[in-house]
Image (cartoon, rainbow, N blue to C red):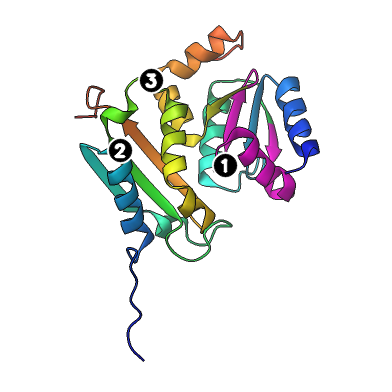
């Protein structure tokens, strides 16, 4: 795995407090799991940035190695890997996601 | 032609069940093949690509959500390397809601 893709990923998560690596984009998700995370973030009115792994094979493999996580989507909040669709969904339903955003100083609507 | 003899369980579903049973000694283990529901999209090459997994195990005590998932991902590394595309995971300890 090239150093540069890891540097690109690190730069993305440093620059964007809520960063979603996904298939497709927020307007047109290309996978049901990615779509669900977009839906949750949108519903909570959290500003977020996305990167489309389908447009970038190096990123697609790179993000898996970077995170030590074999599936997409992957949500990062303030540089920390929160999880994929299951974890984000569970945390949303339990209220933990709202708490996390509050703790990180990110404005969200429950 | 004789029927080929396969020492490993024949389906990915049965391999996943066997690996998780061995690794986590679960009180409950449910593995469902959900591939049909994802047929036709980019990751769904062939069959046995998408699974729903429920594991209730004491092995998850004291582990965060991410740590639990990583433990399952690591146990199933060989499957991810051979075409497993997506897992929907519910990972609980016996003490947690819906863990009993």
* Chain ID of residue with mark 1: A
Circle 3 sits in a helix, a strand or a loop, which is it?
helix
B30 and A7: which is toward the camera? A7
B50 and B39: which is toward the camera? B50
User: How many numbered callouts?
Assistant: 3
Q: Is residue A107 above or below residue B76?
A: above
Q: In the rendering, at what x and y percent does residue B67 appear?
A: 45, 28
* Chain ID of residue with mark 2: B
* Chain ID of residue with mark 3: A
Q: Which residue is mark 1?
A: A72
Q: CA distance from mark 3 to mark 1?
A: 22 Å
Q: Which residue is mark 2?
A: B24
Circle 1 sits in a helix, a strand or a loop, which is it?
loop
**Callout 3 environment at 10 Å: few (<14), some (14 to 19), or many (20+)?**
few
**Disc 3 and disc 1 in contact, CB within 8 angstroms:** no
Q: CA distance from mark 2 to mark 3?
A: 25 Å
Q: Which residue is mark 3?
A: A94
Residue drawn at (48%, 61%) of the image: B39
**Residue A56 in sight from this viewpoint:** no
Left or right placement of residue B46 versus residue B51 in this view = right
| Mark sitting on residue B60 | none
Q: In this rendering, do the residues under marks 3 and 1 share a single chain?
A: yes
**Residue A52 in sight from this viewpoint:** yes
């Amino acid at each position: 795995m090239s150093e540069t893709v890891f540097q690109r990923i690190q730069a993305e998560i440093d620059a964007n407090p809520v960063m979603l690596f996904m298939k497709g984009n927020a307007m047109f998700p290309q996978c049901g799991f990615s779509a669900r995370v977009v839906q949750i973030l949108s519903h909570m009115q959290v500003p977020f940035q996305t990167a489309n792994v389908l447009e970038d094979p190096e990123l697609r493999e790179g993000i898996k190695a970077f995170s030590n996580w074999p599936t997409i989507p992957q949500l990062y909040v303030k540089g920390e890997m929160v999880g994929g669709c299951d974890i984000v969904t569970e945390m949303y339903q339990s209220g933990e996601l709202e708490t996390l955003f509050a703790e990180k100083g990110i404005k969200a609507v429950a | 032609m004789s029927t080929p003899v396969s020492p490993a369980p024949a389906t990915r579903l049965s391999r996943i069940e066997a690996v998780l049973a061995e690794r986590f000694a679960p009180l409950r283990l449910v593995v469902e093949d959900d591939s049909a529901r994802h047929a036709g999209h980019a990751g769904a090459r062939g069959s046995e690509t998408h699974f729903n997994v429920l594991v209730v195990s004491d092995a998850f005590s004291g582990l965060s959500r991410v740590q639990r998932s990583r433990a399952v991902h690591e146990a199933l590394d060989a499957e991810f390397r051979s075409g497993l595309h997506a897992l929907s995971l519910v990972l609980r300890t016996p003490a947690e809601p819906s863990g009993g």
